[in-house]
Amino acid sequence: MPISSMPLGDEADSSDSDSDCDDLDNLPAYAFHPESDPEGDDCSAAAIDVWYFARALEMRPAPEVRPRPEDEPILTTKPKTPFIGCKACKKWKTYKNTKGGGITSTFRKHLRNNHSAVYQEVCRMLLSQGKLKCSTATAATSESNSSQTRDDVRPHEKFTHEGFLLRLMRWIVADDQVCYCAAEGWNFIDTHAIV
C-alpha cells in the first residue's frame, strides 16, 4: 500500500468492528534472519514493517508545516536520527530513537494499538512482496501475546509423552523448580539427561 493511500489518524482507526484487531494475531510474524544483516547491526534495523511507518526526525517538536506522508521517503531500515515520528498519526507523535533500546517493539506496539487496520494491510503487502519474513517464533509474536511461548504457537501439534516431558523439563529449568519434588515417582532423572 503506497503511503499516499495510507489512512491517517482517525481514518485508520474508524473501524465498525473489532475483527481487524482480532485478525492481527493470525498475521505471520516478522522474523530476523542474521544472514540478511551482513553488517551485524541490531535486529531493529531489519524491522521493515515498523520503519515503513516511521519518519526520520532531527528534532522532537512538530514543524510549522507538517510534511505530507506521500512526500516523505519510505524507510526500510532504522534511521540514524535522534528521533522518529509516526506517519500514520494525525497528531504529531515522536519517539526517542535509541540504539538497541526497544524502539522497534515500542513503535510496533503503537502501530498495533492505534493503526491496526493499516498496519495489517502493510504487513500483508510486505509479506506478498517477500520483504517480510514469516516465522512462528519471533519477538513480534511475543509482543502480541506476552503469555504465548514458542510451544504455544503450534496449535495442532499432537500430544506425546516425550513432548510433555520436554516441556516439563523446560519449565523445571526455567522456573528453577526443585527437581526431586517435580519428578518424584517418574524415574525422571534416571531416564532423561538434564544438562
Image (cartoon, grey):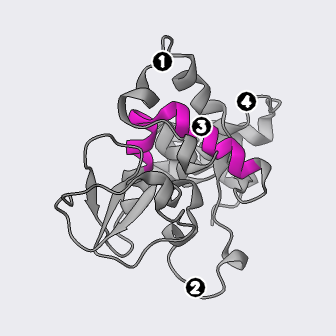
2 and 3 marks in contact (CB < 8 Å): no
Distance in Å between CA atoms under marks 2 and 3: 28 Å
1 and 3 marks in contact (CB < 8 Å): no
Q: Is 152 situated above or below 66?
A: above
Q: Which residue is mark 4?
A: 155
Residue 195 appears in view: yes
Amino acid at circle 4 = Pro
Amino acid at circle 2 = Gly
Q: Quadrant of the N terminus?
A: top right
Q: Which mark is first along the chain, 4 or 2? A: 2
Q: Is 90 situated above or below 172?
A: above
Amino acid at circle 1 = Ser
Residue at the top extreme, as displayed:
16
Q: Which image quarter: residue 162?
A: top right
Residue at the location (20% across, 64% down)? 60
Q: Of 38 and 116, which appears nearest the observer?
A: 116
- SS at mark 4? loop
Residue at the location (43% across, 43% down)? 111
Q: Position of residue 80 (x, y in %)?
A: 39, 79
In the rendered image, residue 124 lying in the magenta stretch gets the answer yes
Q: Viewer-nearest of labels 2 and 4?
A: 2
Badge 4: residue crowd in 10 Å (few <14, some 14–19, many ≥20): few
Distance in Å between CA atoms under marks 3 and 4: 22 Å
- SS at mark 1? loop
Residue at the bottom extreme, as displayed:
39
